[in-house]
Image (tube, rainbow, N blue to C red):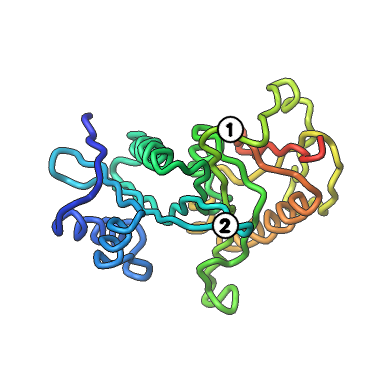
Amino acid sequence: MQIDIRPVTTYAEYRACEQLQQLVWGDEFVVPLNLLTTVQRNGGLVLGAFKGDELVGFVFGFLARTADGRLKHASHMAAVHPDLRDARIGEQLKRAQREFVLAQDLELMTWTFDPLLARNAHLNLHKLGTISRTYLRNVYGPEPELVDGILPSDRFQVEWWLVHSPFARPSADQVARSPLLNPTLDTPVQITHEPVVRLAIPADFAALQQHDPAIAQAWRYHFRAWAEAAFAAGYVVVDFVRAENYYVLVSADA
């Protein structure tokens, strides 16, 4: 399948970005075309994936700063048509976005994702080579948490260091010998301070949310507690192993 990756330019293409957002997420969080066009004209990026004339994916990001004042690219949104999620379009979009950011003489791109979604973890951590050392609670609500059974929108913030990552992945042997911190949902939080550790997530969290909301809720708070404790102890997420659905973390001190 031929996919053309290029900047969004026309009114119809920006409208297609709105429509794709509605298809993927519903009406609640749609970024309107007037904001998309303004960002595109002022140092940001709206990059589309086209199958012929049809927009089937896009990414949207803008210039931003880190807490210490470093310029970066903040990637806010990435969407792919649900029928094409296994066509590696998201990966193509992110790699094209990387080239755009490098051309601006920037070395860092950040974005957030739900750390319990294994598909996204595999793309972000394993394929693209991002890292994470920031856990954000309930980024998009609800407020208060668990209104009408809706789970809090916790996120990992990932850092994509485009030239040189500050943390290397451990060897396969190191990973195989590392402890799994949370083998069960009721495992009490206790950091072992090993050089490499693993942190598990469900194989299909979206299915849990639909078919077993109580277990999905338990996973949200279980993983929040473990991830926050690991980051506070100086660990950094550097990889995700899809076959067994666990994150690989290394000690920053090591």
Q: Is residue 248 above or below residue 211?
A: above
* Closest to the observer, 119 or 103: 103
Q: Quadrant of residue 164?
A: top right
* Closest to the observer, 178 or 232: 232
Q: Is residue 8 left or right of residue 28?
A: left
Residue 57 location (% of width, % of height): 29, 46
Residue denoted by label 1: 164
CA distance separating discs 2 and 1: 24 Å
Residue 135 disc label: none
Please state which of the two labelled residues, at mark 2 or mark 1, is closer to the viewer: 1
Residue 217 location (% of width, % of height): 62, 62
Q: Is residue 2 above or below residue 68?
A: above
Earlier sequence position, callout 2 versus callout 1:
2
Under circle 1, the secondary element is loop
Residue 83 location (% of width, % of height): 28, 44
* Location of the C terminus (image quadrant): top right
Residue type marked 2: Arg
Q: Is residue 237 left or right of residue 81?
A: right
Residue 247 location (% of width, % of height): 65, 39
* Residue at horizontal 45 percent and vertical 41 percent from the top: 105
Q: Quadrant of residue 28?
A: bottom left
Q: Is residue 84 left or right of residue 51?
A: right
Q: Is residue 148 left or right of residue 89?
A: right
* Residue at horizontal 60 percent and vertical 36 percent from the top: 240
* Closest to the observer, 68 or 222: 68
Residue 155 disc label: 2
Residue type marked 1: His
* Residue at horizontal 25 percent and vertical 46 percent from the top: 7
* Residue at horizontal 25 percent and vertical 64 percent from the top: 33
